[in-house]
Image: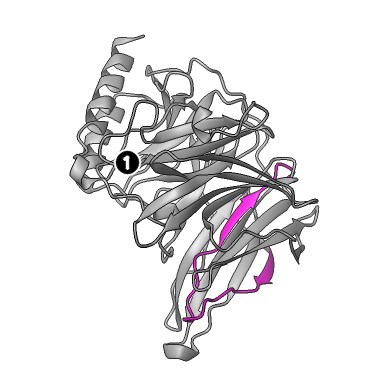
Amino acid sequence: MTELEERLSRELKELSERAQPGSIRPLREPQVRRRPRAVRWLAPVAAVAAVLGVIAGVSVIGRPGGGGVRPSVPQEQGPMPRYYVTVWQTYAGSGNGHVIPTYAVVHDSATGAALASVRVPTLTDSQGGTQGPSITAAGDDRTFVIMEQSDVPRINVFYRLRVAANGRSAKLSKLPVSVPAYLALTDVALSPDGTRLAMDVQHCNDKTESCPYTGIRVVTIATSAVSSWTTRANGAPFNVSWVGNERVAFEWQAGGRTPPAGQQTGYRLLTLTGAGRDLMASRAVGSPPARPDGSVPAALVTADGKVVVTSAGSNVIELSARTGQPLRVLYTATGGGSGCEVLSLAPSGIHVLVSCPAFGRVDGDRFTPLRAFPSPSSSGISGQQAATW
């Protein structure tokens, strides 16, 4: 290990240990998402600055004269997906008669140009509100699943979006997938082969703010067969994603002030073909440093399970999944803002959709701004957005 790697590892660890136990929020059933997932759990300015002070010493691979940390796990620059899809809602009007239309838009990944648009049924609850839509993609660049949710009563609806080979049209169909009303669901991910949905679920008690049942639920779309990996440990999984077709990555958010060994907040990798159905038998993988509130930024694992792509302040970075050591900085956003979040990782190579806070793609170490969502207008407020490829 180089002196730079040792320093970076040490200072990241010190940063993560600064979180005060009292500042870590207690575990509770997920609240209605009233803002984009891309900006969930933003770090305070002071914490971001501390991270940037450490990351500044790591050079981006490929920059002229760059002599920083080089990845110990080479990543081939595979093909970039031809399309990405955004899904968004716009609030029009005011009062009880307001309209909340939902749209899915197919974009050209090279230019960001909109190629096709589909109206998605908006699921509202008994109070007229709606949770933000989410979208996830298979590995064929043409199959997507959109999830709509209501809070009262709790309902989840899933739609498959099939994009034409030329990207100029898309067809929406409702999937025969259901989730029991007693389960709270936050994130869903479509397997690369497009056959299964993985989702994080909790069965919580509103009065005691405890969750006696929490885990990962995998549903085979064609048959509705369900496999579950659960735990009674104090905590819950979030930000579920696939690593190939037989492993699922997720963020484990520990509850309580002092989690037992092996149950600390961080990212984990669950092998679906392994024996047993214990969620905590999953393996801990390299995780970004915890923020002061105890959370960690969104992260995605490459298909070979070797590299974690995540963010630290205004940087999009790679970590070793085996050691947690930093490998390289892919991109550093400039001009201020709220920092970076990774949104979606291509099936091969390092192609990442990011919000920094400008929306765009990172290919290796190059950032390209792309079109994403409509700007707010005098007739409505643009909000509740998601994107994937």
| Quadrant including the N terminus | top left
The amino acid at mark 1 is Gly
Residue 95: x and y, percent?
42, 89
Figure check: 234 above or below 13: below
Residue shown at 45%/29% (left/top)? 318
Q: Considering depth in this image, is 361 or 44 the residue closer to the camera?
A: 44
Residue 374: x and y, percent?
51, 68
Q: Residue 86: within the magenta?
A: no
In the displayed structure, does residue 332 sit left or right of residue 354? left
Residue shown at 29%/11% (left/top)? 3
Q: How is the image coloured?
A: one colour
Q: What secondary structure characterizes most of the magenta part?
A: loop
Residue 34: x and y, percent?
41, 66
Residue 68 lies in what quarter of the image?
A: top left
Asked whether residue 353 appears in the rendered view, the answer is: no
Asked whether residue 180 appears in the rendered view, the answer is: yes
Figure check: 359 above or below 1: below
In terms of secondary structure, where does tag 1 sit? Answer: loop
Figure check: 185 above or below 256: below
The magenta region covers 116-140
In the displayed structure, does residue 182 sit left or right of residue 60? right
Name the residue that disc number 1 marks. 313
Residue shown at 42%/46% (left/top)? 341
Query: What is the total number of numbered labels drawn onto the structure image?
Result: 1
Residue 32: x and y, percent?
43, 65
Residue shown at 57%/64% (left/top)? 181
Residue 173 lies in what quarter of the image?
A: bottom right
Q: Residue 127: within the magenta?
A: yes
Figure check: 294 above or below 262: below
Q: Considering depth in this image, is 38 or 264 the residue closer to the camera?
A: 264
Q: Considering depth in this image, is 253 or 173 the residue closer to the camera?
A: 253
